[in-house]
Image (tube, rainbow, N blue to C red):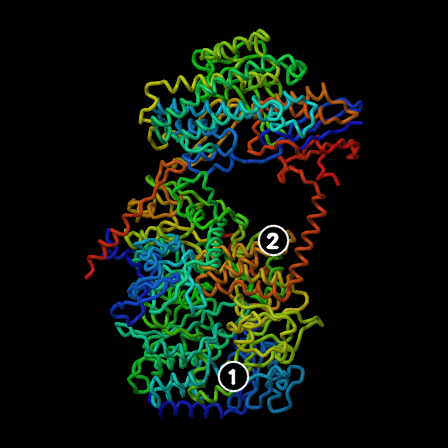
Amino acid sequence: MTRPSVPKPAGVAQPQVVTLRIDGRDVSARSDETILSVARQNRIDIPTLCYLDGLSGWGACRLCLVDIKGTPKLLPACVTLVREGMEVTTDSPRLQKYRRMVLELLFSERNHVCSVCVSNGKCELQAMAQRLGMTHVSLPYRYPRLEFDSSNDLFRMDHNRCILCTRCVRVCDEIEGAHTWDCRGRGIETRIISDLNEPWGESSTCTRCGKCVNVCPTGALSQKGTAVAEMTKRVTFLPYLTLMRNSDEP
Amino acid sequence: MPREIEINPVTRIEGHAKITLKLDDNGVVSDALFHVTQFRGFEKFCEGRPMTEMPSLMARTCGICPVSHLMAASKACDQLLAVNIPPTADKLRRIMNLAQIVQSHALSFFHLSSPDLLMGMDANPAKRNIFGVLGEYPQLAKDGIRLRAIGQTVIEILGGKRIHPAWTVPGGVNAPLTPEKHQQISQLMPEALEIAQRTLVWFKRNLSRFSEEAAAFGNFPTYFLGLVTPTGGLEHYDGLLRVVDARGQIVEDMVPPERYLDIIAEAVEPYSFMKFPYLKALGYPQGIYRVGPLARLNIIDHVGTPLADQEWAEFREMHRGPVLSSFHYHYARLIEILYGVERIMELLADKDIMSPRVRARARPNRDEGIGVTEAPRGTIMHHYRIDEHGLVTWANLIIATGHNNLAMNRGVLQVARHFVDGSKIQEGMLNRVEAVIRCYDPCLSCATHAYGQMPMRIELRSATGELLDQVGR
Amino acid sequence: MSLVAVKPSPPSNDKRWKIVDATMRRHGHEPRALIETLHTVQETFGYLDDQALRYVALSLRTPLSKVYGVATFYHFFTLKPQGEHACVVCMGTACYIKGAPQLLEAIGQKYGIKPGQTTADNRLSLLTARCVGSCGLAPAVVFDGEVVGRLDKSDTLARIEKLICAKPAEVQHDT
Amino acid sequence: MTPEELQKVAIIEQESQEQYDHRIHVCMAAGCLSNRADLVKQQLEKQIAANGLERRCTVKGVGCMGLCAAGPLVSIQPKGIMYQEVKPTDAPDIIQTLDKAPIERLRCDTAMPFFKEQKKVVLENCGLIDPERVEEYIAVGGYQGLLKALTEMQPAEVIEEVTRSGLRGRGGAGFPTGLKWSTVAKAQHPDGRKFVICNADEGDPGAFMDRSVLESDPHRILEGMAIAAYAVGATQGYLYVRAEYPLAVKRLKQAIRQAERLALLGNNIFGTPFSFNVDIRLGAGAFVCGEETALIASIEGKRGQPRPRPPFPAESGLWGCPTLINNVETFANIPPILRNGGEWFAQIGTEKSKGTKVFALAGRVKNTGLIEVPMGIPLRRIIFDIGGGIPDGRKFKAVQTGGPSGGCLPERFLDMPVDYESLMQAGSIMGSGGMIVMDDTSCMVDVARYFMEFCMSESCGKCVPCRVGTAQMHDLLVKIIEKRATDSDVRLLNELCDMVQSTSLCGLGQTAPNPVLSTLRYFPEEYEALVQAGREREAAGSNGSAMHVAPQLKPNSTQPQAHVDSEVTP
C-alpha cells in the first residue's frame, strides 16, 4: 500500500515504529503511516470514498472518521498519522449513524438515480450505501439540474452524478501532470471544471489519458458509448504508477 | 339540472386516472371525460441526457411494460448510431419483447380483468379481485400467475432482472445467449403453450355470458393501427405501419415507421395530461383509431404461427371482418399469448441464436432517430433528436394508451349512456365504466396498481357545486 | 509549447497590462502570486475575463482550471463587468436585524434585479456584502464606494436615483 | 534606529503636540467618515485659518472613538470635551467656543456609562492618535514593548511573559496564546523558516473590532507581530486583510512603509540580530479563510479550503513551515503586555479569562459602537449600561455573540459574566466579539436561518457534512418559517445539527449548527408555534380526504372545464 502524501510535521527525521490499538487489537506501525493504511494492513476495513490508494489524502468525504481516545473530535483515518499509544475505534453505532448520514447527504445533493446510471452495479457510492445499510434518504432531494458534458471524443462528464471527491482533480494533477480538472465556486455551488470552465472536448490541457474516468467512484465520468450499467472502472493501475514515479526519487 | 359524477381514482388499471360523467337535466349522461391526472414529463426531462441512457431511462416510463419502451428506445438509438444490428441481436430482442407481451397480457387478463368476468360486474368488490378468483377458480388463477411468471422469467434470464433489465442497448444487446440460458428458456415453453391453449378454450366457452358487455363496451366503428410484417403478418418488434378502417379496408399500408407523422398528429386537451393522437387524414376529433391486441388482429392478413393462425381465423369469423367491440381486447390478448409462446419457440430453434456477435458499435451518426414497436397495449413510438455530442435535444413519445385515448373517451361515454342512471349511483354501474377503460388495459405511465378494496368516492354535484349524492367505499 | 521558456505577451496593447505585469514581477512570477495578481487585474480592469485569466495562468505557470477555481472561490472577484454604478447592501447581522432585507427588496422591485445582477441598461449593479463593518450605522449601503448608514427604503431609492442620473448624457452617447 | 533615537522621536512628538492649546480630534474611522467627518475636519481647518489660530490650535484625524452611533465625533484635547453628530456647519461655533464653555447642544456626555464602564487596553490609542503618523504612536509609548523584548529579553522569556499574562486567542476559540507561541518556537523545519501571520480577515457579520483597530492604530499590530516573530524565531510576517476594508489596507501599507523607514521593520532592528519583514496579503471575500489552514492556503495562492488538522499550522503551516497565526486583537494585546508585564495584564478579567475584550455592540440597542470591557463583566452591564438598553420602548429578547459560530442567549443569561467558559456553557461562544442585541420584534427561527444561510454560502464545499448539511439545514429552517414543516422536520434538523457539528472538517462546519441549537434550546416555543401553525394549515387544507390524486400541476394552462374537484370547491 502506498502512502498518501500528508503534510509531514516538521522535525520528524526518521520514521519510528509505534504500537497502537485499533478496535481493541494491538498493532504496530511506522510513525509516518496513516491510521487507514495501518488498519487495512490489519484487515480492519474503514469505509472511504474520496480516498484512493496512490493519490494524496483529501479528508473530505468524512466516511473514514474514527474515534481516538482522548481526542474530542472525530478524525479522518485517511490523513491522520498514527501515534504511539493511540487507541482507535473504527466502528461504533455513532460512527455508523454519521456515515449513513454522509451518504444520505450525498444522495440528496444531486441526482443519483442509479437505475439509469452507467455505473449501476459498479458504483462505489452505491456499494457503500449497500454496505453501510443506508436504506432510504430521509432528507429532501435537492436535484439541481446540472450539465452533462459530452463534448470530449472519448469520455463524458455528468455533473449530476458527481460527489466532488476530487479524485479526478488529484489524479490529473498528481499522476498525469495535466491539471485539467479543478473545482469552481464553493459550498453547495461547487462544480468540477476543465480549464477555464470550458467544455471538456475543447480543453487544451487534457491528454485524453482517461485516468480521471477510471478513478471516478460514480458514473460522473464515463467512457462514451457505454449504456446503463456498462461502465467498469479500473483503478489498479494507480498504485503501480505511483510506485514507479516514487522509485525515481533518491 | 346538469350534474357531474366523478370516479376518482379509477382502480385496477396501471396509473392514476379519473372519470367525470356529466349529466343533463334529465339525469342522462351527456358527456364523459377520462382524465389522466398525473404529470410525468418524460419528454422534457430526457433533454440534455446522453442518447445511450435513453433505453433505460425510457423504460422507467412504466413498470409493467418496461421492455416495450426499452425496445422502442433501443431501435431509435440504433437509428441514431446508423447501424444495422447483428441478426442474432434482433432475434434475441424479439424473444424478450414476446416474453413481455406474454407476461403483460397474462397480468391484464388474469389479474386485472378476470375478476369481472368470473365474479360478475355487480359482485362484492372485496371478492372481485385476483384473490377472490384464487378462491373460486383456483386452476385459472394459478394458470394466470404461472403464465406471468414464465414471461417474467424469460425476461430475467435474458436481461438479468425481471423489471427494467438493461440488457438491450443501442446497437444490439449486451450479452449473447448462453447454452444454459437457452435450455432454461426452452424448458419453460411447453407449459406456457399448454396454459395459453387451455385458457382460450375456457374463454371461448364462456363468451356468450358476456354478450351484453361485448355489445356495449366500446363497440363502435373506428380505424385500427399497428405494425405488420412485409407480408401482412402479425408483428410486434419491427415492421411497417398499416391502418385499416372499420370495415377492414386498408387505408394506409407498408408505411415505414419513420414516417409516422405522415399518418398521425397529436392534439392537447385541457382536462388531461395525456395527449390525443388522431389520424391526420380525418382530422381531430374525428380521426379516432385503436391500437393494441384487438387492432393488431384486425389489421393483419395472417398471424404467422400454426396454432395462433387457427385461433385468429376463428376470431375473425365472429363478425366476418374487424372485431369492433373493445370487450374483445381480452380475446385478442389470449390469441397473442399463444402466438408469443409459439414464436419464442421458433426463435429458440434458430441456428444462429447463440452467436456471440450481438452488438454493433458506433458513435452517433444521425441526429434523428425513430423507434416504433408494438407494446402489449399497442404501438409505441419513440422519436429523438440529438446534438453533435449525442445529447438528446428533443423527444416525442406516443405510447399505446395515448393512441387509444380518443377511443377510451368514446367508450366511456357509450358505457355510461348504457348503464348509468343519473338519479341513482350504483357501485356496479360505476364499475362497468371502469371496466371499459380496463379493456384497453391502459398503461397510464405508472406502476401503481391496486387490488381489492380501494378507497373511492363518487360525488354527484349540481352545476352550482351543491352536493346531491355521494357514494363511498 | 513550452510554458516555461516563452514569456507570454499580454492579450492586447492596452497599457494597463503593465500594471498587472508589475504585480507579477514583484512576486517573481511565482504561482503563489495568483490572488495578488487577480486583485490587480480586477482593480485595473474592473473584472476578470477569460483572456485575463488565461494570461495570468500562462504568466504564473499555473493551470487554467486552478486559476478559474481560485477566481470563483473568492466572492470579491467578479467575472462579469459590473454596471456603471454599484449599490452594495450590507447583509451583516446588525443590518439584517435592522431591515437590510427590506431595502434589498425595495431596490429589487424598483429596478427588477436580484443581488448579483445588473440592470439591462447597465446603469446599476445590485450587490450584497456579508458585512461592511459599519454595524454601528446599520442598515448600511455602499453607493459607489461610499458607505451610508441608517437608511430607510425611500432614502435608499432616492440615493440610487441620484447616483444613476448623475451623467445620463454621456451614457446615451455611448450607445 | 537605536533605542535612544526612539526616545528622541517620542519626545519631539510630545513637545510638538503640547505646543497647542487646543488639539481638535476628528474621528476618521469608517463609521464617522461615512457621515462625512472628512468635511467636518476640512471646515474646522478652514475656520482655524480664518480666525488665525494656527499656532494655538491643531486639527487631526484620529481613529475610532467608539460611539459610532453618534458620529461624526469630535473631541477637544486636552480639555476632554466631546461633541457628537457634528455637521460641517458646526465648525465656526466649535472654533469660537474653544476658550469658552462647551456647546451644550453638541455635547456628548463622557461621564455616561458608555465611556465610564469601559476599560481600554487594545483600544487605548484609538481616537487619541493620528493613525497615519508613526510619530504619534511612538509618542504614546509605541514600539517600547518591542524594544524591551529585543534588548532585555530572550525569546523564551517573551513567551513566558505572554504565558504569565494568561492571554487567550481573541479569534474565537480562546486557545492560550503562550502555549501556541511555545509550540511554534519548539517546532523545527529543515530550511529553518518560520512565519507569523496576522489574521485580519474579520468576517463575522456584525463584527468590526479588527477593522477599527487596524484603521485607528495600525502600528500596534506591527509591533505585536514583531514581538511574536522574535519570540518564535520567525523572520517573515503576513498580514492577511480583507480587501473589503480598503481604508485599513491603506493605513497598514502606510504603517509598514513608515516602520521600514524608521528601521522598526527590516534587518537588525534596534541594532540586534533580529530581522523581520511584513507583507500584506489581501483576502478576497471568503469567511472560511478565517480558519487557519484555509487562510494559509489562501496566502499560498490557492482556493481557501481548509485541510484536516493535525498537523497543526504550528508544526506545518505556510509552505510546510511552522507558522504562528493570531488575530488582530491578540496581537494588539502584546505591546502593553510587554510594556507593563504579564502580571499587570493578568490582574484584569477573571481567573480563566484574562484581560479585556473588545465588542462590536450592534442591533437593537441605543448606543451602538465599539466597546472594550474587562472580561467577566455581566452581559446586563454591557447591554443596559454601556449600550443604554433597548430603544423604542421595546423589550430585550436575546443577545447573539460569536457570529455564525455562536448562539443566541435569552434574558435569563443577562447576569452571566462574559468569559470564554460561561459563554461556551450557555451554548454560545466568545467568537471574535460581535454582539448583536435583539428585541421582541425579532423571530429567532429567522435569525437561525439567517446564520445558516451565511454558513451555507460561506462553506468552502470541500467536506460533505458542511457543504450539503448546511444547505439541508437551511432548507429545513425555511420550511419551518414557511409553516410547512412537521415534527419530523424538527427532529431531522436536530439530527443534522449533531452530525454536521461532529463530522465537519473545519470550524466553520463544526460550529455552523450553533445558532440553530441555541435557539432550539432557548426559544423552542417559537419553533413549536410555527410547526403548530403548519399542522393547522395542513388540517384545514386537506380536509381528511385520503384519496386525492389530483395533480399539483394543472394540465396545460386552463382549468378542467367539466369537472368538479373536491379540493377546488370550498
- Residue on which disc 1 sits: D351
Identify the subunit bearing mark 1. D
Secondary structure beneath disc 1? loop
Q: In the displayed structure, does residue D520 sit left or right of residue D255? A: right
Eye-nearest disc, 1 or 2: 2
Q: Is residue D472 above or below residue D195?
A: above
Image x and y of residue B210, in percent: 65, 15
Q: Is residue B187 above or below residue B449?
A: above
Secondary structure beneath disc 2? helix
Identify the subunit bearing mark 2. D
Q: Is residue D42 above or below residue B412?
A: below
Pointer 1 or 2: first along the chain:
1
The residue drawn where x is 57% and y is 86% is D76
Disc ID at residue D488: 2
Identify the image quadrant of residue C108. Answer: bottom right
B181 and C29: which is toward the camera:
B181
Image x and y of residue C92, in percent: 55, 65
D539 and B143: which is toward the camera:
B143
Image x and y of residue A35, in percent: 35, 61
